[in-house]
């Protein structure tokens, strides 16, 4: 990339399906947020590569995946995305699929049903509820 662009990638509250409720569910959400935040530069790179190919690409993308008991990611997929983000899928899925989470001592899988990202070339975004 020859030009650095201002971008915003907003991490919205995720919708998680987990067997646990209460404190355990909140702990799962916090763990997922931490891993996403620690890998956000890679997600931003995917977006910058996309806008190099498709200027004006922006919008919401919802990714989903399963966290395996060993902490690896399985079944990474795009649940939905703004059509303007065409071409970002492969990069996002490759990045999400490479993430490592803490091992689950209960040997349970955790299904992340949807984790939304909002991408904007001009660096602005609105909360999910306002869109």
Image (cartoon, grey):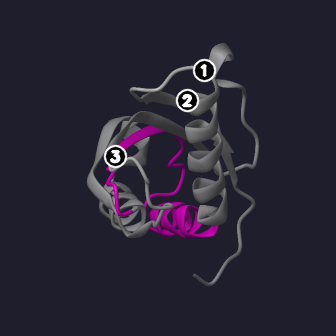
Is residue 10 shown left or right of residue 103? right
Residue 119 at x, y percent in the picture:
59, 46
At 59% across and 65% down in the image, what residue appears?
Answer: 39
Viewer-proximal residue, 122 or 20?
A: 20
Judge depth for marks 3 and 1 and give the one in front.
1
* Mark 3 touches mark 2? (CB < 8 Å): no
In the figure, residue 79 lies in which quadrant? top left
First in sequence, mark 3 or 1: give its number: 1
What is the spatial separation of the Cα atoms under label 3 and label 1, in whole angstroms?
21 Å
Residue 54 at x, y percent in the picture:
44, 58
Q: Which residue is mark 3?
A: 65
Viewer-proximal residue, 100 or 119?
A: 100
Please tell me whether residue 13 is drawn above or below residue 102 in the rendered image.
Answer: above
Q: Is residue 60 visible?
A: no
In the figure, residue 24 lies in which quadrant? top right
Q: Is residue 128 visible?
A: yes
First in sequence, mark 3 or 2: give its number: 2
Residue 64 at x, y percent in the picture:
36, 41
Q: Residues within 10 Å of mark 1 (few under 14, many from 20)?
A: few
Q: Tell which residue pokes out farthest to the bottom in this image.
A: 2
Q: Which mark is residue 25?
A: 2
* Mark 2 touches mark 1? (CB < 8 Å): yes
Q: Which mark is residue 22?
A: 1
Please tell me whether residue 1 is drawn above or below residue 101 in the rendered image.
Answer: below
At 49% across and 70% down in the image, what residue appears?
Answer: 49
Question: Magenta segment range?
Answer: 41-70
Is 87 magenta? The answer is no
**Local SS, label 2:** helix
Q: Residues within 10 Å of mark 2 (few under 14, many from 20)?
A: some
What is the spatial separation of the Cα atoms under label 3 and label 2, in whole angstroms?
16 Å
At 54% across and 44% down in the image, what residue appears?
Answer: 58
């Amino acid at each position: 990339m020859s030009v650095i662009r201002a971008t915003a990638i907003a991490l919205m509250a995720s919708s998680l399906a987990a067997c646990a409720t209460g404190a355990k569910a909140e702990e799962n959400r916090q763990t997922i947020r931490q891993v996403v935040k620690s890998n956000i530069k890679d997600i931003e790179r995917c977006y910058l590569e996309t806008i190099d190919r498709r200027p004006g690409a922006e919008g919401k993308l919802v990714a989903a995946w399963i966290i395996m008991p060993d902490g690896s990611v399985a079944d990474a997929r795009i649940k939905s995305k703004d059509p303007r983000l065409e071409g970002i899928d492969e990069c996002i899925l490759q990045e999400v699929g490479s993430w490592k989470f803490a091992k689950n001592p209960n040997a349970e899988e955790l299904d992340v049903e949807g984790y939304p990202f909002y991408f904007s070339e001009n660096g602005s975004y609105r909360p999910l509820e306002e869109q």
